[in-house]
Amino acid sequence: MLLLSLLPAFVPARETAPRIDLRHGVRPDTIRLKAEDLKLGLPCDSVYLKRRDSLRRNDSLRRQAEQRNQRLYDSIRSKTTRRAVPRLLYRMLFVNPVLDTTANGRVLDESRQFERYSGRRIGEVVIAQDPVFTPDGNWLERTGNKLHVMTRERVLRRDLLFEPGDTIAPELLVRNLQLLRSRAYISDATMELTPDSLDSTRVVVTLRSRDSWTISADAALHGEGRTMIGLSDANIFGSGNRLSVATNFSRNDFGYGGNVVSYDIPNFLGSFYKANFSAGRDFYNSELRIGVGKEFILPTDYELGIAYNNVKAKYYLVDRDTSDLAKSKRFDVWAGRSRYIRSIRSSVFLTARYGFARYSLRPDVTKTYNPAFHDTDDVLVGLGLYREKFYTTNMIYGFGTREYLATGYKAELVGGYSWREFGEDMYMGLSYKAGGFTRAGYLMGGFSLGSFIDLATGQWTQSAVDVNLRWFSPLFVWKRSHIRQFLSLNYTQGWNRLEGSDEVLRFTAQDGLSLLKEDLVGTNRMVLNTETVFFTPYQPLGFRIALFGFADFGLLGRDANIFKNNFYTTFGLGVRLRNERLVFSTIQLRLGVALGKGGWADCRYFQASNGTRMEQYRYLPSRPEIVRFR
């Protein structure tokens, strides 16, 4: 009842599709400008605009430029196909462009295209699959198609949230497309609805999917000479399951350090339960991890899961500036239920969780020292409201293909009880986050606040607040390139913290400064990350190129006034290469420097990394958590 009474104050305005001004052709993810005294730079000319209607000339000239470019490419292709070597070079350097399904950054509500069939019955469900690469591509692409094992049709059917006989629900179809695109073995998926020629009350649903190239290699260099090389397949034998094997050895004497094997099932027998298993050793580290669970998917749904971890690993102890071995057994079980309330267009949810941790090897501990290594039994309960809706856009994390971004909100109250090795505590927490598209771009903000209460003394302990703000701009067009600005702000502060590991903050990979190597600690941290990305039109061998500049600013220390703490900044340039059809989709190179109050700071200068697709900006509830402080 408390959350319902606060709903008008906390819930964003009614979720609607971004408004489209049809009079002037203004799209929701487009900067609206007055044409008076506006000069637009075009690839081959400039036009001085005096009236709003003149903005249409830009589209006409752009189409003419695209037609000229296409005639040029056709001419090059016809001339190079006459001889073997030029033909080979053409196939290596030029590829068929990937369709920008969302028209260069515009925000679309895909559910609208299904609305005219809303309420009709689903007749036949047809699956149409495309190979990873185009069949008429170069030799490397054709060979890749021959080696690749296509995803089995029954795997795709298991991922469907509907079946023949169900009624068409537009929002459900969009949610299903987002689910399919989140699978590592799928690079793209679309749905087409057509009336059944034999029954006017039924609709034929055609799902067209394109596989990803899912075999990848990995390598890592760790301290003390430890080296890892690995091989994985995210679609083993077309099953949709992921198998990974990593081998460890010493690069000093090539001594064998052990293997780690993992197997992940994203959808067990169509139940939408995930299952994972990993076991092995890496020199002195070892692990056994087993987990099974189902997440919330629909507005009215449930979650259920269980996990067991037996891990031995080295942990960095900040206060001693050293690493020490710890061995623990952890067990976790959780459940939850949500129900959609039509009157408020939101879902109410209730979640519960029980877990314990037992250490057989650990650093020194006392009641106030190293609480992260205490034996504990915890019970947490969460209650809240949420809403989530997907819109389609592109050129955010991908380079042109369809991307689904969530809008909505989540408000949650968390309470619980902890039986600790040195006493008993009660926990109370509150969190809220909301996000959506505005005329200025996508904006998401949220906070989490929580604290333990020592029942023996009544004092608040290990209190923390975590605030996040994320924004990215509409897509700007400059000649043949597209530009987007990204910004993220994180503020974390702790009060009444104890001593030892995990009781202080550091600059981390998630909330930190790129390339910085300074070892700093504190209880008050603020980080601002900015990035300007230029999406170029070039795509050699199917890899699209994006250039970016970054500037990060951070404050960290123990003073309650954040601006009196240590200040650092890093800035530089980088390049990303991404092939949307490969599971290892992003290769990133960074070059930059770091500065502090005292001048130049210790940094890496150059960094090479790779990344995979990540789910961002979700508002689904999950098992209740203690507010993070790390």
Image: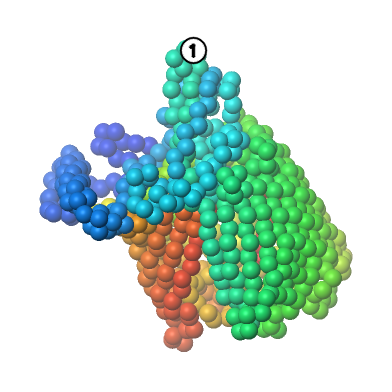
**The quarter of the displayed image where residue 359 is located:** bottom right
Colour pattern:
rainbow
- Toward the front, the furthest residue is 84
- Identify which residue is drawn at 52% across, 52% down: 214
Q: Toward the viewer: 160 or 453?
A: 160
Q: Could you tell whether 346 is left or right of 576 in the image?
A: right
List x then y, in percent, for residue 506: 60, 74
Q: Could you tell whether 316 is left or right of 145 in the image?
A: right
Q: Could you tell whether 302 is left or right of 346 in the image?
A: right
List x then y, in percent, for residue 21: 31, 36
- Identify which residue is drawn at 52% across, 59% down: 216
Q: In the image, what residue type sits under mark 1? A: Asp
- Identify which residue is drawn at 44% across, 86% down: 599
Picture layout, residue 586 above or below residue 168: below
Can residue 560 be seen in the rendering of this structure? Answer: no
Q: Toward the viewer: 193 or 302?
A: 193
Neighbours of disc 1 within 10 Å: few (<14), some (14-19), many (20+): few
Secondary structure of the residue carrying numbered label 1: loop
Quadrant of the image containing the C terminus: bottom right
- Identify which residue is drawn at 49% across, 84% down: 602
List x then y, in percent, for residue 39: 16, 53
Q: Could you tell whether 158 is left or right of 106 in the image?
A: right
Can residue 352 be seen in the rendering of this structure? Answer: yes
Q: Which residue is mark 1?
A: 199
Q: Toward the viewer: 163 or 178?
A: 163
Quadrant of the image containing the N terminus: top right
Q: How many marks?
A: 1
Picture layout, residue 152 above or below residue 534: above
List x then y, in percent, for residue 113: 42, 29
